[in-house]
Image: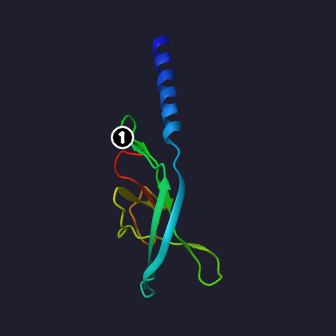
Amino acid sequence: MKIFSCYFKFKFLVALLLTSLIGFSNNVTVSNVTLTGQDTGNDFTLVQFDITWENSWRVSAGPAHWDAVWVFVKYRVGSGNWQHAWLNDAGHTAPTGSTIDNGLEDPGSAFNATTNPSLGVFIYRDANGS
């Protein structure tokens, strides 16, 4: 039992050190935001932007883990209150080397534009790297 305990402590320490070494994602920048394709009849507007961040990473060895950026859209009409935009579950264009996953209001249920909309998206690397 003593050997297992020491091995577990060593393994935990290594995992902690690796996490601290690769966990420095920072400086998220959203730029070149444009609104296009507004359709007031169907109540939607397309949003286009560039996003970057430093030190992004993804590891598949051991327990797979990676960083991601949570992207959501807020809007207001005139000088009114800011409101949360609901996103569609399809039609997103992932930049080369990335993946986009919807963040549903109720992740355990299927997308529904009225009862279970996408409140934002997670953008992350689609392959190992840093």
Query: Which image quadrant is residue 90 in?
Result: bottom left
Please, what secondary structure does the residue beneath circle 1 have?
loop
Instruction: Give me the residue at 39% from left, 59% from top.
Output: 100
User: Measured from the top left, where is residue 86 in percent x and y?
Assistant: 48, 71
Does any portion of residue 62 appear in the rendered image?
A: yes
Given residues 121 and 55, the one toward you in this image is: 55
Q: Is residue 71 above or below residue 74?
A: above
User: Which residue bears the numbered disc 1?
Assistant: 60
| Figure colour scheme | rainbow
Q: Position of residue 65 (x, y in %)?
A: 42, 43
Picture residue at 50% right of the left edge, 68% below the top: 31
Left or right placement of residue 119 versus residue 62 in this view? right
Task: Answer whether residue 117 is visible to the viewer in this image.
Answer: no
Q: Measured from the top left, where is residue 1 in percent x and y? A: 47, 12
Q: Position of residue 7 (x, y in %)?
A: 46, 18
Q: How many numbered badges does the structure rendering display?
A: 1
Residue furthest to the bottom: 41
Q: Is residue 4 above or below residue 122?
A: above
Which residue appears at 65% of the width and 81% of the height?
80
* Residue found at the far top of this picture: 2
Left or right? Give the position of 94 relative to 120: left
Mark 1 burial class by Cα count in 10 Å: few <14, some 14-19, many 20+: few
Q: In the figure, 39 relative to 118: above or below? A: below
Residue drawn at the location 48% of the way across and 40% of the way down? 22
Indicate the quadrant where residue 77 lies: bottom right
Residue kind at label 1, given as amino acid type = Ser
Q: In front here: 1 or 16?
A: 16
